[in-house]
Image: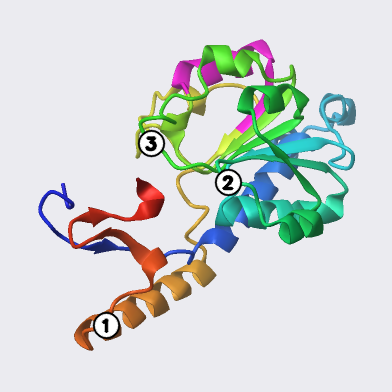
């Protein structure tokens, strides 16, 4: 609509990427280590170590794949490197070879070929008409049984009921994220009740540090506007009616 009206739309690009990448790492650990049942035991006055340990694993040696390796995906891979995981990434574009070597990540050209290799899958792609519902029942079935999925990208990339069913059956051992197909999520949304989930409201990019970066970025863009200057190119979503290249 903005493009049709000839408007310019911009954002403070990159202001929350560190916050989101750190949150993804948090959710991976929460699910892989089976943290939440232990927390609930502590709250409820229970003590059953075996009831937690039978589904708790180390991250070391596991294969983790990110579907999308833009700014957030790259930051996540960098943060995972010290855990000695096998790191894979699927993206339209291959990383710079030096960065790829530094991170120790391997490029996968075929998404469906990567999925069964992964113990953990992290969604880091934008929502487009091509990615809406990308993880449907058939694609989830291609994942390894017992896979953990983390999605802080967009909820609508997943088929809502397919994820709930896969968590209930145990094919997906845990699903976590802060994005929902509809926000705010209805009180009866199935993701609120499916087993082994680590869902929250949409909070990963709103740390105090991220908010400070938002404020500084808005001030900079307003200053540029009143000086008659362009914004940094990466900040544009629509520029004078033209969709920015990264969104085409």
Question: Separation of disc 3 and disc 2 at Cα?
Answer: 17 Å
Left or right of residue 227: residue 173: right
| Mark 2 vs mark 1: in front | 2
Q: Earlier in the sequence, mark 3 or mark 2?
A: 2
Q: Residues within 10 Å of mark 2 (few under 14, many from 20)?
A: few
As drawn, the label of residue 229 is 1
Left or right of residue 56: residue 27: left
Residue 204 part of the magenta segment: no
* Residue 4 at least partly seen: yes
- Write the residue at 89% across / 26% down: 50
Q: Residues within 10 Å of mark 1 (few under 14, many from 20)?
A: few
| Above-or-below relation of 218 to 197 | below
**Percent position (x, y) of residue 188?**
39, 23
User: Badge 2 is on which residue?
Assistant: 93
Left or right of residue 101: residue 155: left
Circle 2 SS class? loop
* Residue 45 at least partly seen: no
Circle 1 SS class? loop
Q: Relative to the observer, which residue lies in front, 5 or 42?
A: 5
Magenta residues? 159-175
User: Badge 3 is on which residue?
Assistant: 128
- Write the residue at 75% across / 61% down: 98
- Write the residue at 52% across / 53% down: 204
Question: Separation of disc 3 and disc 1 at Cα?
Answer: 30 Å
């Amino acid at each position: 609509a903005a493009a049709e009206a000839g408007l310019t739309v911009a954002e403070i690009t990159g202001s929350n990427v560190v916050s989101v990448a750190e949150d993804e790492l948090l959710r991976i650990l929460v699910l892989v280590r089976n943290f939440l049942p232990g927390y609930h035991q502590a709250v409820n006055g229970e003590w059953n170590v075996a009831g937690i340990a039978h589904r708790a694993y180390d991250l070391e040696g596991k294969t983790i794949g990110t579907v999308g390796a833009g700014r957030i995906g790259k930051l996540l891979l960098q943060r995972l490197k010290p855990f000695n995981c096998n790191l894979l990434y699927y993206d339209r574009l291959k990383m710079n070879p030096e960065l790829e070597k530094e991170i120790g990540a391997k490029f996968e050209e075929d998404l469906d070929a990567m999925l069964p290799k992964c113990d953990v899958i992290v969604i880091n792609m934008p929502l487009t008409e091509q990615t809406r519902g990308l993880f449907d029942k058939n694609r989830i079935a291609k994942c390894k049984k017992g896979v953990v999925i983390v999605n802080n990208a967009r909820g609508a990339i997943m088929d809502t009921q397919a994820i709930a069913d896969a968590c209930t059956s145990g094919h997906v051992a845990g699903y976590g994220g802060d994005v929902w197909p509809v926000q705010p999520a209805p009180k009866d949304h199935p993701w609120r009740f499916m087993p082994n989930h680590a869902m929250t409201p949409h909070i990963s990019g709103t740390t105090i540090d991220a908010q400070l970066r938002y404020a500084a970025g808005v001030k900079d863009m307003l200053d540029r506007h009143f000086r008659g200057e362009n914004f940094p190119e990466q900040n544009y979503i629509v520029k004078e009616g033209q969709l920015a290249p990264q969104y085409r």
